[in-house]
Structures are given as structure tokens and as C-alpha cells.
Amino acid sequence: MIRSLARLVILGSMLLPAVASSAALEPLHSDGMPLPLPKPDPALMYPAEPVDIEIPLPRPDLATILPHATRTVTEMFLRQTGKLTSDEATYQLKSGEGLATLLRRAGFDRADAAAAIEAVIGRASLRSLPVGLEVRATRDGFAFTARNGRDVFAIRDPEEGWLAFTAIRPIERYLAYAQGVIEDSIYRAASASDIPDPALAEYIRVMGFSVDFQREIRGGDAFELLYEQQVDQITGEVVGTELHYAGLILSGKQLGYYRYDHDGSRVGWYDRTGNSAARTLIRTPISGARLSSSYGMRRHPVSGYNSMHRGVDFAAPTGTPIIAAGSGVVTEAGWYSSYGRYIRIRHNSTYDTAYAHMSRIARGVRAGARVEQGQVIGYVGSTGRSTGPHLHYEILVNNRKVNPLTVSLPTGERIPPELLGKFNAKVELVEAEMLATGNMRFAAMAPLPSGDGPQLAP
Ligand SMILES: [Zn+2]
């Protein structure tokens, strides 16, 4: 496709000198109608030597190549031929019926139906048309929507006979901005704001790395989002929804993430400084410690029985600081039978981490408190069923203990440096769109913590 376009461009530019030179022969002053230009000699349209130059062209946008679909076949017929035809009627493809039979039902004679189908072959897979397919037909043409979402039109041109072509459905993109205060549930608040389900689902997923919507939301927390809806201009149907910005004020703290499409293959979410919204949990939430017992079957050092060790042990001197493996909410902090002094943190609806045998729990770390990744939550000890100072550390996925050293965790990569320019442009665009709605943004409502972005990033 690209190659053939390149050739077209070359031929086009070859035509120009011929036209220009004939134009130069025109009189300088003319009061009458301009003389018709001589038609270029067709021979000049073809270079003597095949030209094979690679012209760097942007990838052609299908929307600029394919014609746009019209609402009706009648409109398309008028556009293509300048003539009027009969009003259209809609026919549904019946079980066991082919397009030819349907066209006969629509009043086409055998020869016309055959010629029309001959033209359509190659534009759509006629063997796999679904039962119930709606075919709109007039006496001079018909159209249906193929599986790829494009419309196939067939028109009986008075001069050229049956022509068939693929047309793109006119899709318009509408941006919408929504914000609101959360009283009890983000879902309730979102439905009150008419946020479409796909945008809300994406919002929850993106924010879910940093926020536990079940436990962390306090009355007065607020959300904002910018999303796009793609609307088919013919049917008025929403055919796509895309979230572009997700913002949240959580206990006075501001979070904001921007969508970034990596070559259309992967979508990433980043704060305005380029840190990923996706968080990884720290596999070793203690520094300078030695792995003294790994995950799996072992002979228990105290009971002497063989049992499953569903965590990892890091031996370290009493008093060595232990940090939160990820941001989240403390669900347990205190004595917990054989675990001794114990902390459990819920990071999101999927991940929890737990820390046992501490000598001391850090000040302010109690059930319900929010902790940030890297924050010191307690100190190594040997409380509970333990033979010496160590940290017993667990990662739980959906409440199931997994091997902290091997479990796959969401990555927390930054936006690559070479994409930072493009990303910043996207951030500016989104900011400008939100500003244009005239709403008071969070950026104006809550002062940012020191530094550029939210402080939750690792
Ligand atoms: Zn252990």
C-alpha cells in the first residue's frame, strides 16, 4: 500500500512540468473565460525508466484513503453518480440464504444480482456473512456492514456498471470530563456522574495500584477523569471508550495518571513526572539481611515436623528496620499468636504482604493507617515462635500465600527517556482539554506535596 502510494506521488509530480509549461503560453491579460488547458499527453504520465525511489511517507491513515460511508445507499448513489434512485429498504439475511438470494428478494433480477456479487467479491468474505446481517438495498445498489466494522457498498453506475467499494464509517471522538466527591463508594459516585463502565473499569484498574477502594476511601475524597467516546455518526452508537486521565484526592493527597500508548501495542499509565502507576512490591523489604529460609517444605526449626513454609525468612540483627513492600493500608498490627509482633498490609484488591516476629512496630503503624512503599513499619526481632532474630515475610495474592521471591509482580517502570518528550506533549494536551471544560481542577484544589508529582511513587 505504501509503495503504491509512493509511486502515485512520483507520477503526480511528473505531471506538473507539462501543465506548467502550457500555462506559461497563456496571454498575460485575459478578459474572457480562461482557455481550457490542453490535456497532458498520457505518454508523459509514465516515466521512461521505472522509478524506484523510497519516499518517506507517513503511514497512510485509512480514513484518508477510504471513502466515508453515508447513512443511506440512496445518499451514496447520489454522491457517486449524481443521480437519484429508489428509497432503500432493509433485508435480513436468513439462515441458509446467500447474498444472491437476498438480492433476488430485494427485487434484483438474476443477471443484476450476479453482476453485483461479482463486484463485491474481494471486498467482503461472502461465505461467512452472518445470519441476520442487515442489507440495505435500493434498485441501484446495496450496502452492509462487514465484520471489520467497515461498510461495503455496491452501486450500479450508469456508465461503468456495478462498482463495489469499502467505506469507513464516520466515527467522531468526543471528550468528556467528569469529577465528583465520593461519599461512600467510587462506584456509586461514578454512576451518579454517568461515567461509562469501560472508563470506570480502567480508572479502578489504574488507581488500584495505589488505592484500595474498599478500605481506603474516606468521605470527601474526590475523583476526576477525562475520557473519550467514539460515536458512530450514522447509528449514534458508542463504539469505543478510552480513558485519558485518572485523578484522585485521597485524604488530601493528590494522585494523577496519564494514559500513554506505546506504539498502539501497549498502554501505560504514568504520573506527570513519568513514573508508572503500576507498582511493584519490594521482594526484600529489609536491607542488609541474609535469606535464612526460603519458601517451601522444610523441617520446622522449632516443632521439628516437616511443614510448608509459606514465606521467606531474612536473618538480621534485632532492631534492623523493616520497610513496607508497597503502599497500602495496614490491616493488622500487633501480637498475632506464633507470628509474634505482626503487620499485615493490604496493597490493593489483589496483593497483601505480612511481616512477623518483630521486636517493635513503628510509631503510627496501626490497623487502618496508610503506609507508603519504603516507609519503616517495624524492627526485626524474635517474638512468637522463633529461634533467633529474623523477619518472616509473606506476599499474598488473593489471600493465598505465594513465594515472594518468584511471584510475578506488576512492573513499576518509568516512561523511557526517549519517549519523555512525546509523553509531556500528551500531558499538556490532556491538561489543556481539562482546563477547557472550565472546571476547577484538583491541581487548584489541593496543593501538591513538595516535588513535582504525587509522593506515592517509589
Ligand atoms: Zn518464616
Image (cartoon, rainbow, N blue to C red):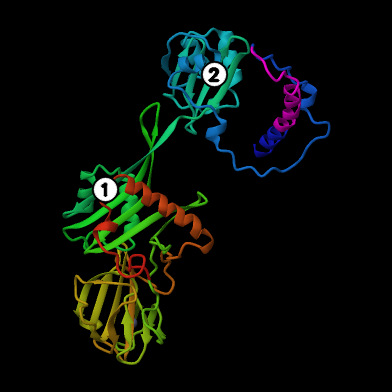
At a point 50% along the width and 62% down the height, the residue shown is: 416
What's the residue type where badge 1 is placed?
Asn
Regarding residue 90, the answer to whether it shows in the image is yes
User: Around disc 1, counting alpha carbons within 10 Å, would you say few (fewer than 14), some (14 to 19), or many (20 or more)?
Assistant: few
Q: Position of residue 252 (x, y in %)?
A: 22, 64
**Image spot of residue 182 (x, y percent):** 19, 54
Which mark, by number, is residue 204?
A: none
Tell me which segment is drawn in magenta.
Answer: 11-31
Q: Position of residue 296 (x, y in %)?
A: 39, 77
Q: Position of residue 140 (x, y in %)?
A: 52, 11
Alpha carbon of mark 1 to alpha carbon of mark 2: how far?
A: 48 Å
Element type where label 1 sits in the image: loop
Residue ID for mark 2: 154
Q: Residue at x 31, y 50 (%)?
A: 225
| One can see residue 306 in this view | no
Asked whether 19 falls inside the magenta stretch, the response is: yes
Specify the quadrant that holds the N terminus.
Answer: top right
Is most of the magenta stretch helix, strand or loop?
helix
Looking at the picture, does residue 73 appear above or below residue 390?
A: above
Amino acid type at image mark 2: Ala
Query: Which residue is rendered at x = 35% and y = 78% of the image?
Result: 309
Residue holding disc 1: 439
